[in-house]
């Protein structure tokens, strides 16, 4: 296999651990913190997790290692979408495990949670691990989105662990995967399987965070990668001065990625789904807001600009989410077959017109035809519209175009509007991890092993104080149940980790809000450039604006 010079150079990078984990395994001990409560619904969560609820938070510190000496056999999986740094979590876990006892063994289950069910695995050794140090991607063992949530599945997992003598599992995933890790931990404790379960917080979306988990890994690298491209596009726009670029960025639900990219690049427009929902903005109002910027810039002779659109935006537009539920209802069960059998789009349109309420039909009618058709093309396994596949960047540019045409007809606008569209998603998920993500992930993995070694289960590997240099980071663990509440999912009450949405009274959004009016009309672009791996610390090691503002 041919290896790029950068990959070779990255093999030599030594990820930085928190100071307290640097003294060698024999000098890491536990400092007990206080007992925890779930963020809400305490009684219900406690009843559902009788064996793992309410445990103490812990931190590690320098001191004599008092953990039991026993051979450890550990399994690990990657779960969900790729996020830069996943390989380093496994490398950190492996290094801590081997440093503790050379006879310890690490199994990697392939293809995500399904690997645990199918008993599809590899056993890591130095040669294999070394090929993946400080690299992007999840290809070390692959990932998948199978959900581990039923008792039958847990029994299979326990059986497979028993077969290999595995006494601990590390689940590297987002909010859903860590919710399932907590349920699995409870199952294992209740059934005396002898298997500990530890989670690690992953997702580029940045929506697995709270007062304890300052950020999920991958968010730093992904947003830097997108911001580099957005900056490049801004510079092109400012050079050619003839296009408006509508750039959709990933983030299935929350708008953290869009907001962080806006903080890094200062575009003319950035929509934030959480604000749209809070203000109950309609599609027409959003289009009007963007068109105001286009018109103001056109008045200065600038017929160019950049707008960032979060992937999950449409679900935050109240009238659009009502439309989606009505469409889901309209095509429920066998009705979808009747719809699909209709020969022409005109016939289908009449069917839709007949089935939607007057209000939803009014929303549907203003959508460009390609978006209307997208709403009826792609369905998920439950038969629902796949909102993330809607080309919202094209939707909003089309609505803005109509809005500007109406202004032109009234003599209120005299500019040009040529739009180009981009979707930045997969480009960022497997980038070489930034130094921050390389260090953070390695520390999460290393720390996960320390939690295992000290016998914890149902805990999330926690590394905090992240806006400071790695030397000052704080390593420890937090019971996953602390992050849980009860939510309605698929018609039933479920204990889940609460998803972190953008807080409109939080410092990152407030900073954006204070500046965006100026960014909308001026050309205040910032060009972050590519992620740098070697060079001065302020260029290579600084993390996100979101974290800096939150911790300022
Ligand atoms: P996770 O929540 O699993 O980390 O995945 C997030 C994400 O990258 C979203 O931003 C995006 O909507 C989605 O995955 C895409 O999923 P897929 O890889 O299945 O196409």
Image: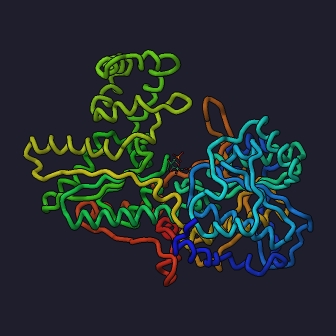
What is the quadrant of residue 321 in the picture? top left
State the residue at coordinates (70%, 65%): 128
The N terminus: image quadrant:
bottom right
Give x and y (percent) for residue 375: 40, 32
What is the quadrant of residue 64 in the picture? bottom right
- The residue nearer to you, when weighing 239 against 510, is 239
Residue 37 showing in the rendered view? no
Give x and y (percent) for residue 463: 67, 67
State the residue at coordinates (41%, 37%): 318
Answer left or right for 97 relative to 492: right
As displayed, is residue 256 above or below residue 96? above
Residue sticking out furthest to the left: 411
As displayed, is residue 495 above or below residue 37? above
What is the quadrant of residue 150 in the picture? top right
Residue 478 showing in the rendered view? yes
- The residue nearer to you, when weighing 86 against 326, is 86
As displayed, is residue 239 above or below residue 45? below
Answer left or right for 89 relative to 431: right
Residue sticking out furthest to the right: 69
As displayed, is residue 412 above or below residue 371? below
Residue sticking out furthest to the front: 1
Give x and y (percent) for residue 4: 52, 71
């Amino acid at each position: 296999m041919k290896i790029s010079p950068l990959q070779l150079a990255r093999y030599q990078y030594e990820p930085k651990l928190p100071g307290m984990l640097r003294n060698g395994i024999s000098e890491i001990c536990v400092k007990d913190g206080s007992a925890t409560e779930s963020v809400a619904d305490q009684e219900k969560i406690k009843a559902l997790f009788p064996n793992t609820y309410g445990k103490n938070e812990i931190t590690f510190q320098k001191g004599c290692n008092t953990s039991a000496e026993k051979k450890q056999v550990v399994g690990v999986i990657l779960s969900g979408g790729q996020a830069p740094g996943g390989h380093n979590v496994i490398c950190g876990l492996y290094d801590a495990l081997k440093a503790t006892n050379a006879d310890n063994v690490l199994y990697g289950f392939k293809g995500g949670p399904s690997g645990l069910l199918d008993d599809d695995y590899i056993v890591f050794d130095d040669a294999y691990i070394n090929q993946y140090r400080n690299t992007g991607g999840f290809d070390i063992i692959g990932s998948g989105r199978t959900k581990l949530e039923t008792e039958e599945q847990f029994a299979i997992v326990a059986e497979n662990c028993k077969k290999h003598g595995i006494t601990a599992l590390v689940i590297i995933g987002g909010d859903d995967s860590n919710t399932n890790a907590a349920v699995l931990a409870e199952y294992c404790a209740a059934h005396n399987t002898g298997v500990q379960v530890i989670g690690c917080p992953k997702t580029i979306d940045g929506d697995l965070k709270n007062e304890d988990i300052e950020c999920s890994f991958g968010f730093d690298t992904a947003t830097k990668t997108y911001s580099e491209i957005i900056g490049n596009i801004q510079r092109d726009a400012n050079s050619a001065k003839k296009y408006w670029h509508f750039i959709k960025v990933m983030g299935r639900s929350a708008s953290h990625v869009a907001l962080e990219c806006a903080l890094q690049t200062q575009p003319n427009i950035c929509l934030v789904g959480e604000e749209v929902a809070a203000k109950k903005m309609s599609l027409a109002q959003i289009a009007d807001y963007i068109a105001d910027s286009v018109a103001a810039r056109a008045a200065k002779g600038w017929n160019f600009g950049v707008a960032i659109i979060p992937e999950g935006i449409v679900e935050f537009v109240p009238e659009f989410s009502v439309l989606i539920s009505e469409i889901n209802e309209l095509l429920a069960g066998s009705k979808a077959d009747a719809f699909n059998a209709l020969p022409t789009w005109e016939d289908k349109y009449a069917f839709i017109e007949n089935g939607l309420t007057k209000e939803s039909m009014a929303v549907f009618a203003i959508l460009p035809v390609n978006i209307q058709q997208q709403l009826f093309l792609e369905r998920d396994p439950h038969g629902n519209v796949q909102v993330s596949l809607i080309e919202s960047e094209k939707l909003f540019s089309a609505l803005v175009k109509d809005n500007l045409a109406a202004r032109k007809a009234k003599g209120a606008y005299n500019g040009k509007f040529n739009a180009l569209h981009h979707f930045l998603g997969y480009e960022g998920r497997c980038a070489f991890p930034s130094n921050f993500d390389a260090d953070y992930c390695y520390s999460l993995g290393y720390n996960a092993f320390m939690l295992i070694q000290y016998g914890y289960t149902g805990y999330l590997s926690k590394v905090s104080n992240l806006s400071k240099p790695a030397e000052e980071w704080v390593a420890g663990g937090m019971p996953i149940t602390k992050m849980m509440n009860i939510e309605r999912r698929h018609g039933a009450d479920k204990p889940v980790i609460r998803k972190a949405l953008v807080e409109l009274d939080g410092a990152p959004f407030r900073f954006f809000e204070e500046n965006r009016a100026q960014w909308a009309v001026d050309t205040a672009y910032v060009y972050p450039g590519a992620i740098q791996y070697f060079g001065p610390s302020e260029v290579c090691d600084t993390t996100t604006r979101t974290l800096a503002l939150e911790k300022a």
